[in-house]
Amino acid sequence: MFDVFKTYLLDKISLTDEELERIRTVSIIKKLRKKQYLLQEGDVWKYDAFVASGCLRTYSVDEKGNEHIIGFAVENWWTGDRESLLTGQPSRFNVDAVEDSVVILFIHTNFEQLCKDIPAFNNMVNAILQRSFVTAQNRIQAALSYTAEEKYLNFVAKYPGFANRIPQSMIASYLGMTPETLSRVRSATAKK
Amino acid sequence: MFDVFKTYLLDKISLTDEELERIRTVSIIKKLRKKQYLLQEGDVWKYDAFVASGCLRTYSVDEKGNEHIIGFAVENWWTGDRESLLTGQPSRFNVDAVEDSVVILFIHTNFEQLCKDIPAFNNMVNAILQRSFVTAQNRIQAALSYTAEEKYLNFVAKYPGFANRIPQSMIASYLGMTPETLSRVRSATAKK
């Protein structure tokens, strides 16, 4: 499964065989069955995590027990809780597998060392962080200004394939609407 | 006004006089009167922008002409549109001054050169990006899962002083609620 990550890396940056081997040496392959947790609320997150296959979701649970999905991560995405990683505080989020998944983990101190020692790797990581920030900003804009229909169409356009892969109830949670509203929106947009 | 940025920098990292001078040489001081634009929708954003004084807001305008405030930036914060900066595409956002403000601009190519040449500066920038991402993630969580009252209390707790400084209509827009709802929430929380 490291090969998926290797392909991802070499698509973005140039690395010597030696550098690739260094990265591989500190990688940890973790298989998750559907519904299995990668991170549970209250635990401190200490990894950088690349999704090699499958799909995971990050969510919080409110006082009434309702789940609120902050984000999904499919193959070639990254997941985890950066706030807990940076602060060392227990996470307020859960990350679990929506499908059977394989994740490549790096203990954060090892990951930081790779960033220090391999400038191209560091640049790649920073570019990913910038894109993650942009994605989050866009999501805030969508949450604030889009109608339910616009939210759904924006989601389908940005994440093609997700809508067929992820349970509708989870998509509704991600979009901040009830499953009933999502169902109505899907019917309305399908007719157009 | 560069001194504000110098203080900010030296609070976070160690820099030689020579490095500080290099940073100063490529900095551009820009004064904005209240309501003046730093960035208008449709323009390409090409800077890194540090707020030395005042307050700016980033917002989009929907088809009906309603403004949706994505974020505020007060002194010692950064502003601009990273998506436009990264993609070279016209911005979907406006950034203007909520108060008379002073911004320190860096043309992005100069800023990138500083990052390349001064490792401590680069590390600081990456740490800021990570925090920006965490802040955006938290905002998504708040938007999805918080009640109107929780949104307001969270805002006041995270950004003390903002509530007295920024017009209520803008805070309502930022929180994704009507001014009437915000007014009701403020009354209700004040009584507690």
Image (tube, coloured by chain):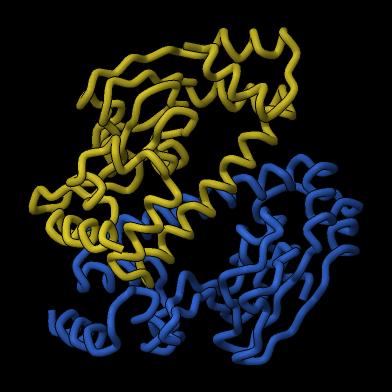
Chain colours: A yellow, B blue
On screen, residue A26 above or below A43: above
- Position of residue A50 relative to residue B106, above or below, is above
Q: Nearer the viewer, residue B89 or B59?
A: B89
Q: Quadrant of residue A32?
A: top left
Residue at x 17%, y 61% (from the top left corner): A184
Residue A167 seen in the figure: yes
Judge left or right: residue B7 versus residue B162. right
Q: Is residue A146 above or below residue B112?
A: below
User: Residue B59, how many percent across, how many down?
Assistant: 50, 76
Relative placement, left or right, of B40 versus B175 is: right
Q: Nearer the viewer, residue A57 or B124?
A: A57
Residue B29 percent across, percent down from the top left: 80, 76
Picture coordinates of residue A180 (x, y %)? 12, 58
The image quarter containing residue A35 is top left
Q: Residue furthest left?
A: A64
Residue B96, horizontal then vertical, whole percent:
60, 82
Counting labels gives: 0
**Residue depicted at 11% across the width and 53% down the height:** A63
Q: In the picture, which quadrant includes the C terminus of chain A?
A: bottom left
Residue extending farthest to the front is: A191
In the rendered structure, the answer to whether residue B179 lies left or right of residue B31 reads left
